[in-house]
Structures are given as C-alpha cells and as structure tokens.
Image (tube, helix red, strand yellow):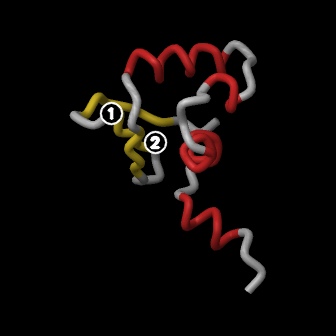
Amino acid sequence: MIRFRYNQTPNGILIQTVGMAKFMEFNCSIEAFEKGLENYKNGDLIQNAFPFLSADEREFLITGLLPEEFDNLFTNE
C-alpha cells in the first residue's frame, strides 16, 4: 500500500498520495475508512477490509494509480 493522507469532506473522504500529488475522493465515512484501514493492516484482503469501496478506489490505495492511469498502463495499444 502506498503512503497517503486523508481528510473528511462534505461528500466523504479525500485521499491524497504522499509524494505523488494525486487525489481521489471516496464516498464513505471516516469511521468506516479507518476501520477498513485497521483491518487491512491486520491482514485482511483489501476487498474484505474495504467492501464499500470500488475496485478502482481499492487499486488507488494499493498503487496510487488513478483509474485512467491504470487502464493506460495495461492497454495493448
């Protein structure tokens, strides 16, 4: 998992990667996010720790890649 900071926003949580200047907003409570983060750090699979996040949001937590960056990286064009 990459290093990141997070802050509460009116719509959920804003995640900022450390050193990469990328942002993604998640639509969940800070309490749910922190509980998921604790579970993930204790060994839960990311999809089990954060079932309320989309696959793109979970990938962002792991790699720091935004959805379009991930798609571009793995597109055979």
**Front tag of 2 and 1:** 1
Q: Amino acid at mark 2?
A: Val
**Which residue is at the front of the view, 49 or 40?**
49
* Residue 23 image position (x, y, % from top left): 39, 50
Q: Residue at x 68, y 69 (%)?
A: 73
**Which residue is at the front of the view, 31 or 73?**
31
On the image, numbered disc 1 is attached to which residue? Answer: 12
Q: Describe residue 7's horizontal placement relative to residue 74 as left or right.
A: left
Does 36 sit above or below residue 47?
A: above
* Corner quadrant of residue 38: top right
Residue 49, label in figure: none
Residue 18, label in figure: 2
Name the image quarter holding the N terminus: top right
Q: Amino acid at mark 1?
A: Gly
* Residue 2 image position (x, y, % from top left): 59, 39
Which class describes the residues within 10 Å of circle 2: few (<14), some (14-19), or many (20+)? few
* Residue 51 image position (x, y, % from top left): 61, 29
Give SS at disc 1. strand
Q: Residue at x 33, y 33 (%)?
A: 12
